[in-house]
Image (cartoon, rainbow, N blue to C red):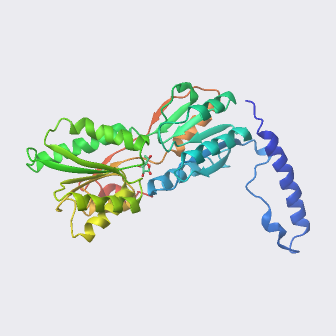
Amino acid sequence: MRRPYKKYIRLFGRMTCLMLLFSVLTAGCGPFQDVVPEEVPNEEENLVVVGFSQLGSESLWRTANSESIQKALTRENGFFLEFSNARQKQENQIKAIRGFISQRVDYIMFSPVTESGWDTVLREAKDAGIPVILVDRKASLEDDSLYTAWVGSDMISEGEKAGIWLEEYLKKEGREEEEINIVVLQGTVGSSAQLERTKGFHNIAREHSNWHILKQEPADFTTAKGKEVMEMFLRNYADIDVVISQNDDMTFGALQAMEEKGITTGVDGDIILISFDAVHDALKLVSQGIINVDIECNPEQGEYILEIIRKLENGESVDKENIVEEKVFTQENVDEYLDTRTY
Ligand code: GYE
């Protein structure tokens, strides 16, 4: 495989050697040894260079996803990972991807903050001969050959699981004929997570003429926005039966807003609360009966990516779509998973 990036690695390698030599010679004579760049790869290591534009650090899920990838693409495993945080801005991701192209990295990975707007930059990557791996969220592209593989969740199915759980729960409670008022805290507008979870839930909701979605409002997957939007829901709607929050961080914010108004949620509460992600702090609330159900979204995608890149390096073919495994957590099954959840 052509590796023009190796030129830079070679240069860095030489610089590192020179700096190391200098620092040895001057050891104890000043602060210079502190600036030796230990991270920079040298030629002998023959590392696979991966540029990764993570979309942000908006949620606990996202932190776990970044950590999983950083843990898999290590030097020991033969990788040099250049990690760039886009702070939830598409323009930052496009800039980072262009930077990776000009550095001639071996692979580009990114988690698209929103679905659309990637055709031009991905065409540039393709023209430069750099394979692109999509992580977590999807991109809607006019030409699917602009990426090599995608690793992530089936988020339509996640939305459907929420709907199916609600259907069964209302039946169990003898409320299946009741008028049910629903509000939805949505994730980042135009992200595949927001679009697909919404679509999946609607696939089930449309079968129930007594379910009324009063309002769906984006809260950007953050706790602060979740609280703000929930406060607005509480001001505008007096009779809410169900809150659906498209991630746990927004759920934490929504819970603060409801607690401040003396409203309870969950198994014995005033409002049914449905959340997504299933991070440890939320699973604790499921166990305590404060969140009724948490639809898991699995952030541990590092190992899948590792395997894909290894196959590509060996000239093997890879599946275009790689879906991670996920569960549904309620008070009935959550305790057996609580202790082992690391994020
Ligand atoms: O649910 C949320 C995060 O794209 C699946 O993004 C991901 C979502 C996840 O910020 O917590």
For the N terminus, the quadrant is top right
Determine whether, in the image, residue 272 is placed left or right of residue 29.
left
- Residue 160 seen in the current view: no
* x and y percentages locating residue 253 in the rendered image: 35, 62
Residue found 53% across the figure and 36% down from its top? 117
| Residue 168 visible from this viewpoint | yes
Q: Residue at x 8, y 48 (%)?
A: 174
Front residue of 269/209: it is 209
Residue 17 sits in quarter: bottom right
The percent coordinates of residue 67 (x first, y second) are 54, 54
In the depicted structure, whether residue 223 falls above or below residue 163? below
x and y, in percent, of residue 127 in the image: 67, 28
Q: How many marks?
A: 0
Q: Going by the image, does 282 lie left or right of 207?
A: right
- Left or right of 276 in this view: 209: left
* Pick the front one: 132 or 27: 132
Image quarter where the C terminus lies is bottom left
Residue at image position (36%, 48%) is 296
Foreground residue among 77 and 297: 297
Q: Residue furthest right?
A: 25
Q: Is residue 190 depicted above or below 232 in this figure?
A: above
261 versus 295 height, above or below: below
Q: Nearer the viewer, residue 208 or 341?
A: 208
| Residue lying at the far bottom of the rendered structure | 29
Q: In the picture, residue 332 is in which quadrant?
A: bottom left
Side (left or right) of 222 relative to 176: right
Residue 18 drawn at (x, y percent): 89, 56
State the residue at coordinates (87%, 70%): 27
